[in-house]
Image: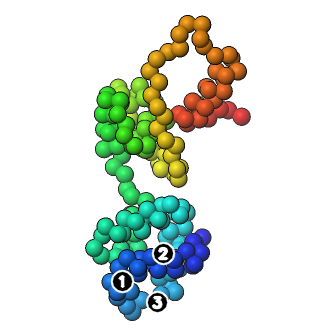
Amino acid sequence: MSLPIGWIERIFERLSGIYGRKFSDMWTGVDVDVMKREWGVALYGSTPSEIGAAIDACRRREWPPTLPEFLMLVKPRVDAEALFVDAQRAMSSGEWGDNRLAYWVTQCVGPSDVRAATWFHIRRRWEKALVDAMSEHDLPPIPDAHVALPAPGRTTSKDVAAHHLAIMKRMVCVREAA
């Protein structure tokens, strides 16, 4: 499978616009059709927003990227242990910032487990949840914290509660049996 050649040509146009001759000189002596096919295969499965973010990142780089460098801009590697530490700090402070990845991985693993576990004990679960979360192209925003319980007698009906419970289960990656 491959991205359409038209997409690759558009990527190359944008990179040429950013880097000028640095980009074209980089490929001197290379079969352009082979190169485009290789880029198409390598970028298959990437979203337009991921590719756009990679091109935006190129604006801050002095030299044009090779294919492996561009792939790292499209799908950056994440240090799972560092993200886990960030999640523990965010849970302690209550400040997630815009670290959606850490937040949603924490929700999938379980906030109480993340708070109490060491990296050694939670590593496999954390890494699996991280891979699952990274496969989501657009993670939902971090919801506002609701720290107060409703006043007695002000709870919702069973239908509304069931609806909210279903939403929360989807948020924390609980899959119901068919």
111, 62: nearer the viewer: 62
Q: CA distance from mark 2 to mark 1?
A: 13 Å
- Label 3 neighbour load within 10 Å: few <14, some 14-19, many 20+: few
Amino acid, disc 2:
Ile
Image spot of residue 86 (x, y percent): 32, 39
Q: Which residue is mark 1?
A: 20
Amino acid, disc 1:
Gly
The label number, if any, that marks residue 31 in the structure image? 3
Circle 3 SS class: loop
Pair 1/3: label in front: 1
CB under 8 Å between callouts 1 and 3? no
Image spot of residue 62 (x, y percent): 28, 73
Amino acid, disc 3:
Asp
**Colouring used for the render:** rainbow
Circle 2 SS class: helix
Residue at 32% across / 83% down in the picture? 22
The label number, if any, that marks residue 11 in the structure image? 2
